[in-house]
């Protein structure tokens, strides 16, 4: 099992290119199941989850061609299966996103429940209720969602989500694109990745109104055609590298990104004392050697502060001047990185969904273990600023969401290397 070995204390300085957003690429790849013709999807990040989604499409008989620039062409004209097997789904929760397209296009689907998931503990039940509202008959048998559409075509419906769900919104939106009649999604997710999927579907011929608001209206059409579509930049990768500059007192310019995607994060970085400048497709942060000021944050669905940047700001506050609170309202049990940061000398006290962080002038290198994707990134940030050497173990979590992370940090001057077991 690989690990990252990092010697901290270097001030980062340089430019990097931001990759395409995984959380946009996965639903867009699932949406290719709806196309009557060849889809060309560009700006895909080179990540394990993307490979898994392509394998999932391939096992259903989709013809997949990967180009040298990591763009992908898909053709669903010769599909042979409508099953998403456990062996693939268990490694990636986003596999549930094929449910809506399969039901909409083919009237049947058999999709494994994501690994470790019971109905109700995560919003898989919201996906199922959305499909049932549009006329699908759904059973859960032996860990599989088995669904079919009597008559073959879903019907438009009014769907209200009790809680905001990104993948639930995306699944229903894709299903509704080919449904008979009008579908209204209330309390819809507003994330940029949801808007990106809507824009892709519109480019395929879908009729969608209200993307980016809490009420979406989808008028079903008979068919969707293939198109060329480039995935939007990864706002969380962007934010992570900007925080890396902030905690090391350095300067980083993120290119091929979009400042409009992370306004809440940029506002908090400016509050921490960073000098932030932007252009149409770049963001530069310069701390000019200063130590950041502590900033309190509260996560919430978009357009508020994103939960996927919470762990990075815990690290920022751990080395900042002052004390701040970080409140997590989106996911429970998402402070598992805190105990690993305490091993490095951080002063963090967790009470329920709140972390109280008192900044220290520095951290100490130590062996640490990643527990999830964003927690992994936070440990790398802590290691970059810590005195001595830090080994970050279980980095397969990082590789699910950050393309070539050690190479990009090396471009910025970090002393970081991947060590194979």
Image (cartoon, helix red, strand yellow):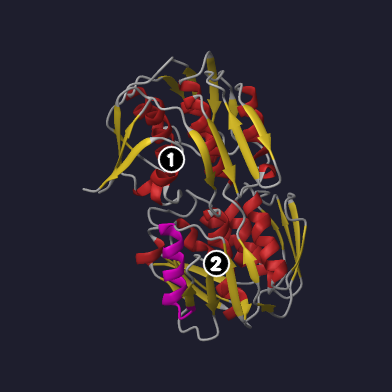
- Mark found first going from the N terminus, 1 or 2: 2
Is 183 on the left or on the right of 349, as rendered? right
State the residue at coordinates (54%, 26%): 326
Mark 2 neighbour class, 10 Å CA radius: few under 14, some 14 to 19, many 20 or more: many
The range drawn in magenta is: 47-63
Q: Position of residue 332 (x, y in %)?
A: 48, 37
Main structural element of the magenta stretch: helix, strand or loop?
A: helix
Q: Is residue 152 above or below residue 334?
A: below
Indicate yes or no whether the magenta region holds residue 140. no
Q: Which structural element holds mark 2? A: helix
Distance in Å between CA atoms under marks 1 and 2: 28 Å
Q: Is residue 83 above or below residue 243?
A: below
Q: Is residue 103 visible?
A: no
Query: Mark 2 highlights which residue?
Result: 29
Q: Which structural element holds mark 1? A: helix
Q: Is residue 152 above or below residue 204?
A: below
Task: Pick out the residue farthest to the bottom.
Answer: 78
Marking on residue 347: none
Task: Pick out the residue farthest to the left.
Answer: 421
The count of marks equals 2
State the residue at coordinates (41%, 76%): 59
State the residue at coordinates (37%, 24%): 386
Q: Position of residue 145 (x, y in %)?
A: 47, 67
Is 384 on the left or on the right of 312, as rendered? left
Marking on residue 409: 1
State the residue at coordinates (52%, 14%): 321
Indicate yes or no whether the magenta region holds residue 56. yes
Which of the pair 254/211 is nearer the observer? 254
User: Which of the 4 image quadrants contains residue 29?
Assistant: bottom right
Mark 1 neighbour class, 10 Å CA radius: few under 14, some 14 to 19, many 20 or more: many
């Amino acid at each position: 099992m690989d690990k990252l070995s990092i010697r901290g204390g270097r001030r980062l300085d340089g430019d990097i290119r931001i990759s395409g957003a995984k959380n946009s690429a996965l639903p867009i790849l699932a949406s290719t199941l709806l196309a009557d013709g060849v889809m060309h999807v560009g700006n895909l990040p080179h990540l394990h989850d993307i490979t898994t989604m392509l394998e999932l499409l391939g096992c259903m008989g989709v013809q997949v061609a990967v180009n040298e620039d990591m763009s992908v062409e898909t053709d669903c004209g010769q599909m042979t299966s409508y099953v998403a097997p456990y062996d693939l789904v268990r490694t990636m929760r986003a596999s549930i996103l094929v449910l809506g397209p399969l039901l909409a296009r083919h009237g049947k689907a058999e999709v494994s429940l994501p690994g470790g998931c019971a109905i109700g503990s995560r919003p898989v039940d919201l996906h199922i209720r959305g499909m049932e509202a549009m006329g699908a008959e759904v059973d859960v048998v032996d860990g599989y969602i088995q669904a079919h559409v009597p008559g073959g075509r879903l019907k438009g419906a009014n769907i209200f989500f009790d809680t905001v769900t990104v993948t639930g919104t995306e699944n229903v939106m894709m299903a509704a694109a080919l449904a008979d009649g009008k579908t209204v999604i209330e309390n819809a997710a507003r994330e940029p990745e949801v808007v990106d999927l809507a824009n892709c579907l519109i480019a395929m011929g879908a009729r969608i109104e209200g993307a980016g608001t809490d009420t979406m209206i989808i008028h079903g059409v008979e068919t969707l055609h293939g198109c060329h579509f480039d995935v939007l930049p990864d706002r969380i990768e962007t934010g992570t590298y900007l925080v890396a500059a902030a905690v090391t007192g350095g300067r980083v310019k993120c290119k091929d990104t979009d400042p409009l995607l992370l306004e809440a994060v940029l506002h908090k970085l400016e509050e921490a004392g960073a000098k932030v400048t932007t252009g149409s497709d770049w963001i530069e942060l310069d701390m000019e050697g200063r130590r950041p000021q502590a900033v309190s944050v509260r996560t919430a669905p978009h357009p508020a502060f994103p939960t996927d940047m919470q762990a990075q700001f815990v690290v920022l506050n751990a080395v900042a001047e002052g004390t701040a609170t970080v409140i997590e309202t989106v996911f429970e049990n998402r402070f598992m990185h805190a105990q690993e940061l305490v091993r490095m000398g951080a002063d963090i006290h967790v009470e329920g969904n709140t972390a109280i962080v008192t900044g220290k002038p520095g951290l100490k290198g130590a062996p640490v273990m990643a527990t999830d994707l964003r927690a992994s990134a936070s440990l790398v940030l802590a290691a970059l600023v810590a005195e001595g050497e830090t080994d970050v173990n279980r980095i397969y979590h990082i590789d699910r969401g950050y393309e070539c992370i050690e190479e990009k940090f090396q471009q910025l001057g970090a002393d970081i290397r991947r060590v194979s077991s």
